[in-house]
Image (cartoon, helix red, strand yellow):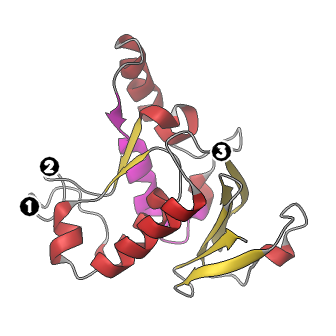
Amino acid sequence: AHRQRIVNWINATGGTSSAFDVTTKGILHSALHDQYWRLIDPQGKPTGVMGWWPSRACTFLENHDTGSTQGHWPFPRDKLTQGYAYILTHPGTPVIFYDHFYEFGIRDVLTELIEARRRAGIHCRSSVKIYHANTEGYVAQVSNMLVIKLGHFNWNPSKENQLDGSWQKFVDKGADYQIWLRQ
């Protein structure tokens, strides 16, 4: 229902406006606590506005109205890098909160994730194919050039029959997340 209300608002602007993907933010709060199944909708798409209208979805974890400044609905601190791994490797227009980049000590992580997005050519309309979304973790191929794994299970691209080609691990943060780029 939340996603539909946001999409209705975008439609009312004639599709000329984007909106904060509050639905994805909310779902990530739970999903990254071993409820990764929340990251896939019944049609096999990402949840939130990014699954229906990614070119109009501004994905975010916090902003000046929620996080460190206001303390209203802050993103779980221990899940920040996982959350950014998700929004920076998926379609939509990801927004990095100023405080996170400059004051939380994760600037290098964010820079690395931005570089993965750049190298894979991910943009606001990139395709997403979700392979796994369960209690153990999440795996998706984005833009045919990047694979991301979130969670606690042992997985790599060679285990997936549909992922042809040669993949090189670009980021390895263990159980938090791993990213492979197509060679």
Which is more N-terminal, label 2 or label 3? 2
| Residue closest to the eye, 172 or 181 | 181
Assess whether residue 26 is covered by the magenta stretch.
yes
In the image, is residue 147 above or below residue 64?
below
Residue 65, label in figure? 2
| Residue closest to the eye, 34 or 154 | 154
Residue 127, label in figure? 3
Q: CA distance from mark 1 to mark 3?
A: 34 Å
* Type of amino acid under label 2: Asp
Neighbor class of circle 1 (other Cα within 10 Å; few <14, some 14-19, many 20+) is few
- What SS does tag 2 mark? loop
Residue 114 in percent (x, y) is at: 42, 65
Q: Which residue is mark 1?
A: 69
Check whether the beta carbons of the residues at disc 3 and disc 2 lie within 8 A of each other.
no
Location of residue 169 (image quadrant):
bottom right
Residue 140 in percent (x, y) is at: 67, 60
Instruction: Please state the extent of the stretch shown in magenta in the rendering.
Output: 18-36
**Residue 1 in the figure: left or right of residue 67:** right
